Image (cartoon, coloured by chain):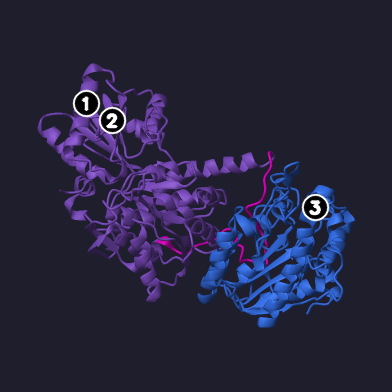
Chain colours: A purple, B blue
Amino acid sequence: MPTFAQKTQSKCTTKANINKGSAVSKTVAKTGTGAVAEAMRQINPDVVAAYPITPQTAIVEEFSSFAANGKVKTEMITVESEHSAMSACIGASAAGARVMTATSSAGLALMWEVLYVAAGCRLPIVMPMVNRALSAPLNIHCDHSDSMGARDAGWIQLYSENSQEAYDNVIQAVRIAEHSDVRLPVMVMLDGFITSHAIERFDMIDDKTTQAFVSEFKPFSPLLDTDKPSTHGPFDLFDYYFEHRRSQAEAMKKSKQVILDVAKEYEKLTGRKYDLYKSYQLEDAEVAVVVLSSTAGTAVSVVDKLRDEGIKAGLMVPRVIRPFPAEEYAKALTHVKAVSVMDRSDSFNAEGAPLYTELTAAMYQSGGRPVMSNYIFGLGGRDVHPSDIEKVYRDTLDNAHNGKVKKAVNYLGVRGDE
Amino acid sequence: MAKIHELAEAKPRLASGHKLCPGCGASVAVNLALNSIAEPVVVSAATGCLEVSTTAFPSTSWETPFIHSAFENSAATISGIETAYRALKKQGKIKKEIKFVAFGGDGGTYDIGFQALSGAAERGHDFLYICYDNGAYMNTGIQRSSATPMGATTTTAPAGSQSIGKGEWRKDMVAIMAAHNIPYAAQASIGYWKDYVNKVEKAIAAKGPAFITVLSPCPRGWRSVEDNSIALAKEAVTCNFWPLYEVVEGNNWKINIKPSKPTSVEDWLKQQGRFKHLFTSENKETLDRIVARVDEEWQKLLKREECS
């Protein structure tokens, strides 16, 4: 089955310029974790501090092997926990180094406190994040509870459908994070096991081009500049804290344009087009599904099947969740009669999952009012089949015809909710 | 070693005008240590009195690069900084020698920051960790820590009709750090500046992790007189409650000061309101246990020295 990325690539680029960026490119077959490790090798950060956790482990293992064999200049810190991983990243980044780490699930949860510190100190740390369910019960498989739980930590969040996107997003993340208008940490998501452990083909650009693209890191008031001592992470009272937070919010706002600019520049090198989101058959769609990451590929095949039946089905796949491009997302969906948002996490607010609530709020402000419904699916790695997604489209069609939602929040593919 | 007039004349790396309480030992512990280091120093500090009293934006008391990240990660943070230094030095982007010192109170060291400290020590980063040890979570209002002495009253283990205050003995932090087989671990007191400065110099000269816990009185938490802090820090040593010793490479124990005739433990306790309740007939047994324990610990230390 062609991935969504392959389909949209072939749709939005002419045959002549597919993968015809200026960079020398080679096609390789690797797992998602391998793709991320390769991107990290090419970025060649000064410091990597990481703690292994399934399914992120292979990233750290493969990168450690690069370091052990002199393929990178990186100094590794094999910390004793994810809390210390992020803390060491904060120290190293404030010191003036280009810094990366990677994590999943409970590891991200353990970092929670210091995720905010990294963002508040405006440190451009880049972190691949392999999505995995949170305990309890213990589960190592894919859902988005981990990164969705951290969506308000002040980090930019990019979601990847497959290895190619994970690789491309990690490289672009460095430029986004370090941009002087932004200076915020970025996490790049890929689906645990589905993407992280499946071997796929993807195109890598050459090391030299990657190095030139990410260019030299220019730190801001580094601690190691001992001639100009600076104090990082000070104590703020009610007189300044709010201004600091406000400027952080402004940086997040500005990052949207930077994400687009970096994507344009990256496209010149690779021929691969990146935007805030991807769409498939959305322009004239009557019903649409919105879904993140690897599920998009399955959804494309369902759209094709429904289109063959004459049903105007469309698909939207957000890439950027923080900042949340409410205006662009609402605009993309405003003409659609009914939209179902598929969330691979639950926010336990008893009113719908994160992507659904944020998109619904975005539609309210835009004035466009498709009938909105939510399908929570795939928790703990539960498979989502084409037939499940087809059911979502058929429910959405009913909603479109009725002009109202039958059931706003649904659980898909779970016992007791069939 | 640095002479006292050199220390006194050196520009303090922690400037005056900070907001630490009168009689607080923390600034003494910081400036004695930092002024005895010749090289540029990058400092990290745990959340606590030292940090909140010296960095209230938009001012800072730090004349040297400083970072505060969180309560439990001063050691992890400095390990990142030290690694960044090695990385950039290897690439030729930094030429000079820089030293790295992490500070934490006893809460940030013995308790919540213990894992990060143990990890950083095991990994062998070249840094000095200094715990300014005042024996409780003073910044948040005198709550019990695992460094709080047995019998002291704190707000979370208060003395009462059914309680003697803290019912447990203090964690033996120097022995725990020495058990990491790090090059240098020591116990010091701001009451003995020369011994402390000496230890900082040895710790900085050692290649790898070094740990010093320095007794740093807190008049608010100890319920003691502000201008008596240095004297209390001295008397803690002379009564053997707080022996001054060092452990080199995890097995070479050396007691630095051996009082020829130890002063009275009771007299030292009496000067601190946190032990006031021990001087009643019903708590006599506890007081006796504390006094006996001081001697037991001293004997243990003598044996450790003898065996190494």
| Crowd around label 3: few <14 · some 14–19 · many ≥20 (10 Å) | many
| Label drawn at residue A330 | none
Q: Nearer the viewer, residue A368 or A162?
A: A162
Q: Are marks 1 and 2 in contact (CB under 8 Å)?
A: yes
**Relative to A378, is A256 on the left or the right?**
right
* Residue A263 screen position, x and y as percent: 36, 50
Q: Which residue is mark 1?
A: A395
* Residue A38 screen position, x and y as percent: 33, 64
Residue numbers of the magenta segment: A214-238
Say if labels 1 and 3 share a chain: no
Number of residue marks: 3
Magenta stretch containing residue A16, yes or no? no
Give the amino acid at mark 2. Ser
| Label drawn at residue B222 | 3
Which quadrant of the figure contains the C terminus of chain A? top left
| Crowd around label 2: few <14 · some 14–19 · many ≥20 (10 Å) | many
